[in-house]
Image (cartoon, grey):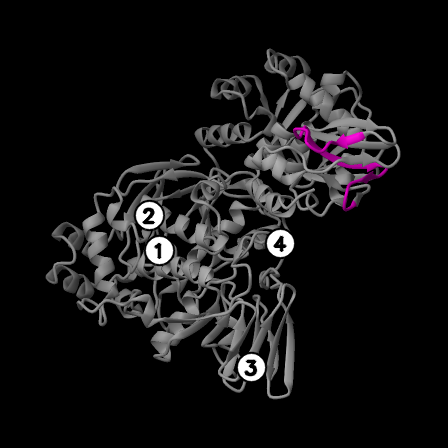
Amino acid sequence: MEKIELSKGGVIVNTHIGPIQYGCPPETIKDSMGLDCGVPQVFLLGDNLFDAHSGTCLAELEFPAYFNFFVKSQKTTVICTPEQKERILIIFETAVFGPKNLATLDDVNLKDLLGEARFFRGKPFGSDDLMQWQDFLDFVFVEDEINFRGVTIKMSHDKIQFTESSQKIIIDSQIQIDPQEILDEIPTVPFVPPTFGVTIIGSGHGFDKASKTCGFIIWANQRGILVDPPVDTTHWLKYMGINPALLNSILLTHCHADHDSGTLQKILEGRRIELFTTETVYEAFVAKGCAMSNMSRSAFEELFDISMVKVGQPTFINGMEFRFRYSLHSVPTIGFEVFHAMKSFIYTSDHLNDSEIVSQLFNGGFISEARKNELNYFPWHHKLIFHEAGVPPLHTPLATLEKLPLKIKKRMRLLHVSESQLDESSPLQIAKPGLENTIILREKPREKDKNVMYLETVARVDIFKDFKIKKAAEFLSMCEVIEFKCGEKIIKEGSDNKDFYIIAQGEAVVEVHSQNFSKSYGPSDYIGETAIILNIPRTADVIAKTDVTCLGLGEYEFLYFIRDSDLAKTLTNLYEIRESESWQLLDLNPLFKELLANQKTYLQTIMERVAFKSGDKVIESGAPLKGAYLISKGNLKGRSRSYSIGDFVIDGPALFEGTKCRDTIVASDDVAAFFVPANLLLEFLKDNPGFGLRFTIDVNGGI
């Protein structure tokens, strides 16, 4: 036997019956295709089908099953529990055949979508013999131990032992999910988003080891819209120096693993994300998400905001006009056109652009004449065309695109295709990934574009989140746009300047010399409020890390703006909390240290400093839960464990279920802590769904 660690997660144990893979995160097939043992036909799944900390599915069997079925003409065997089988089937069937409730959805294109799904499900396409999940998968059930074809597999909570003859291999039951390899070079110059443009993250397909799967960013008024983010896009963006606050929207075209694997990762990264898609795609996303995470639908839908789009109707995102269309694919899939002033581009998503197949669909009664005409008359007039190409019969043959006029091919960039598939003499080009290859359709913003960006900036300031839109308009009417060059001091410690700034574009570093630490701020972060509220000199240096554009208010304008609100009290409390080194305490706690800067700042606004004497009851059994405590000094003692500096003390069930506290927590000595009221903590968890999910998993088992 041989143990092989996979770079994208999971382990292969090579046995006399062939390779057995434990865990199946996205794209592990790209690892196994390059191994001597080849792609496994047997997969063993552990206790968890989802890693909440990374937002990664651990049961992404779609591509291994495709490979074994279409290439090897064999089934894939899955070793799991009966309960897991039901969840795995939802994930798999939704990806391969589309959402089960497709026929019940309200969509004017539904008849054509159902016909196309039935056509692609035929064996062969268009026949009445429809593929079923049983054509792809076999299931073998296991609880603690199984002898599978002469290989004994013994499972415990932390280890898995494989035995054949006298040989034994032990692997960790905790699947290690590390960010996938970053191939791009870190930019030497900070990236400045254009007013309108596209950055390709990946242009490959699910079997292409040499490139990331297809996904990109649409830059709309200096803010990014992620389209089908590939797995570990969040890690790639950080590596590239792109502030997460610049990307608050996701556009999901369909729910195949090479298009949706990075979506939950982004949703769980920071503040709430807005998801744009059709109801048909959304139902697939929710079905897969609930099955992999084992969450209820209502709990899963609390993780993000959804904006349903309608095919053929204009939708505006970040000031750009989008028009959506259904592509021709095996599951509901949307492409779209994007317009900004006189500039535009079109994206097909996965799309079979083949007139012969369209004729088969129409002649077989699978689609209407209107759908046939829509598919046959593609809008080639756009300045930029992102068109998929791949292996027929589910993807557009390169030969079809090669027949197009040269003037169209010059405006086209291919996605979902490998370099090796393209002839060197072809004028067709693959879309090049990387920030340095960003296609700029409009670089400089118009006044209207700037206003859209400024409104978006103010709308996402945490402390303004309860203000109505007229307050944003009031702020913009009063503020001044101020620009700072890289390296310039925006604020100087000790100065009497009393301006308040919101960063609209760029990055700044706040250097707190009194506490010997610094932190980075980006779009929608605010600075300068302390000196105004407390009428004191500046308490820190703020230096432009890049060129920075700020929205500034003078002292009196700021005080007028926050009139009739509790903001002055909130900001006074924030100053007191900041002065007490709470930021460093958050960094000590494994739960909080991964929070983004703006998340930590907002958490500080809802903290209160408290103190206890030795013997005081901090939490009392049988009493309602008041809140949680982050210890800054001293020790607490409960029934089964003790707590010290940096620990966060909370009764999980009492918080989430509203039950009475189950344990009494007592101060072992004099204790100083930061208190977070239960209602405000729950609100924070809702506004920061990724942290909320990880927090729930970590603390809901008890104090």
Q: CA distance from mark 3 to mark 2?
A: 45 Å
Percent from the top left, x then y, of residue 438?
Answer: 49, 52
Range of the magenta residues?
Answer: 617-641
Q: Which mark is residue 239?
A: 4
Q: CA distance from mark 2 to mark 4?
A: 29 Å
First of labels 1, 4 by sequence position: 4
Residue highlighted by disc 1: 349
Q: Which mark is residue 336?
A: 2
Q: Residue furthest front?
A: 622
Residues packed near mark 3 inside 10 Å, few (<14), some (14 to 19) or many (20 plus): some
User: Tag 3: residue type?
Assistant: Asn
Q: Residue at x 61, y 50 (%)?
A: 238
Q: Nearer the viewer, mark 1 or mark 3?
A: 3
Discs 2, 4 touching: Cβ within 8 Å:
no
First of labels 3, 2 by sequence position: 3
Relative placement, left or right, of 126 versus 39 is left
Residues packed near mark 4 inside 10 Å, few (<14), some (14 to 19) or many (20 plus): some
Q: Is residue 381 visible?
A: no
Residue highlighted by disc 3: 14
Residues packed near mark 2 inside 10 Å, few (<14), some (14 to 19) or many (20 plus): some
Discs 1, 4 touching: Cβ within 8 Å:
no
Q: Nearer the viewer, mark 4 or mark 3?
A: 3
